[in-house]
Image (spheres, rainbow, N blue to C red):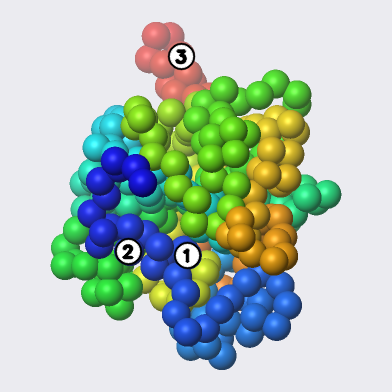
Amino acid sequence: MNSFKTPAVLLLLSTFIIGFSNAATWSYGGSDGPGAWGTSFPDCAKTSQSPIKIVHAQTTADPTLGSFSTSMFTTTPTAMELTNNGHALQVNLVGGYTISDTKVLPGNYQALQFHLHWAANGSTAGSEHWLDGVQYFGELHIVHMNTKYANISVALANSDGLAVLGFFVKIEGTTDNANFDVILNPVRNGNVTYDNDVMPYATPFPISQMFPTTFNDYYRYPGSLTTPPCAESVVWTMFRDPIVISQAQAQVLQTSLYANEETAATNVLIGGNYRPTLDLNGRVVKRTGSGAGTMGKISIREMAVLVSLICSAIFW
Ligand SMILES: [Zn+2]
């Protein structure tokens, strides 16, 4: 059907992470919605689950957390394909970059795929994580696997098996984010309208192309996949600064993608594909930076005053 050569195993793994379906089905509403996931997928009922509500004032500054840099993401994958997996819009990667910097992640992690969660048509609330009481329009997740594990099954069984880097997606203004169109244009063109539709990219691109201008600050906590099987194997990173898109671009996501195949008797739009937040249950959410928010800035100002006083004393 197409010439896109993806190792079958990678496709399988990528599907497993978000589009996973065994004998049990799952959805974001109805009898197989999030409240029932634990029945068919026992890990979903555990106590270190994702997503969560992040409250900045309740996070702990960790000066050992380094900043990610653009150069970690600029390697262009060997091949990429956009797919509608019935639950989300996803890009599978072949030959994705590997982050090898223990200041930002506890191991070497290779990017496998990225995908989006977004608000239902008519709503503006669709992110999975919340930040300071705000549920954003959407959320981008880049899924990585720790390369020390032989395969995804082993990775899913370990607390450091996966690393997900998450960006909030915010609607602001009427100017399109041209970088975001790399995934929206195929949607507009009808290439991935239905479940299992796949469109290979003729020209792969580095994912950093979609990032916000700055992404120095982030939150870090141990959690899970936000879709069944909800394995508690994820080192979570949620960046503070969002990716900004226009209202019109949000509308494309909300009105163009369907949860069932083209031949299905009935169909529904994909949207509202977020899991409700779960309790922290004693987990600590860390954040980058050494200062304690506003207090840290005041201290720096006080330090400047002190330094100038000392200098004055020396020169006088
Ligand atoms: Zn996700």
- Quick check: is the Cβ at mark 3 less than 8 Å away from ligand 1? no
Is 303 or 57 nearer to us in this picture? 57
Q: Is residue 73 above or below residue 49?
A: above
Marks 1 and 3 in Cβ contact (< 8 Å)? no
Q: Residues within 10 Å of mark 3 (few under 14, many from 20)?
A: few
Q: Residues within 10 Å of mark 2 (few under 14, many from 20)?
A: some
Distance, label 2 to label 1, CA atoms, is 10 Å
Marks 2 and 1 in Cβ contact (< 8 Å)? no
Distance, label 2 to label 3, CA atoms, is 64 Å
**Residue 73, how many percent across, how many down?**
33, 35
Q: Amino acid at mark 3?
A: Ser
The mark lying in front, picked from 1 and 3, is 1
The mark lying in front, picked from 2 and 3, is 2
**Residue 266, how many percent across, how many down?**
72, 65
SS label for mark 2 = helix
Q: Is residue 55 above or below residue 76?
A: below
> Which residue, given by chain and number where applicable, does mark 1 sit on?
19
SS label for mark 3 = helix
Q: Amino acid at mark 1?
A: Gly
Rendered image quadrant of residue 22: bottom left
What residue lies at 60% left-to-right and 25% top-to-bottom?
A: 177
> Which residue, given by chain and number where applicable, does mark 2 sit on?
13
Quick one: label 2 or label 3, which is nearer the N terminus? 2
What residue lies at 27% left-to-right and 50% top-to-bottom?
A: 6
**Residue 105, how many percent across, how many down?**
30, 53
Quick one: label 2 or label 1, which is nearer the N terminus? 2
Q: Amino acid at mark 2?
A: Leu
Is 240 or 172 nearer to us in this picture? 172
Is 191 or 177 nearer to us in this picture? 191
Marks 2 and 3 in Cβ contact (< 8 Å)? no
> Which residue, given by chain and number where applicable, does mark 3 sit on?
312
How many numbered discs? 3
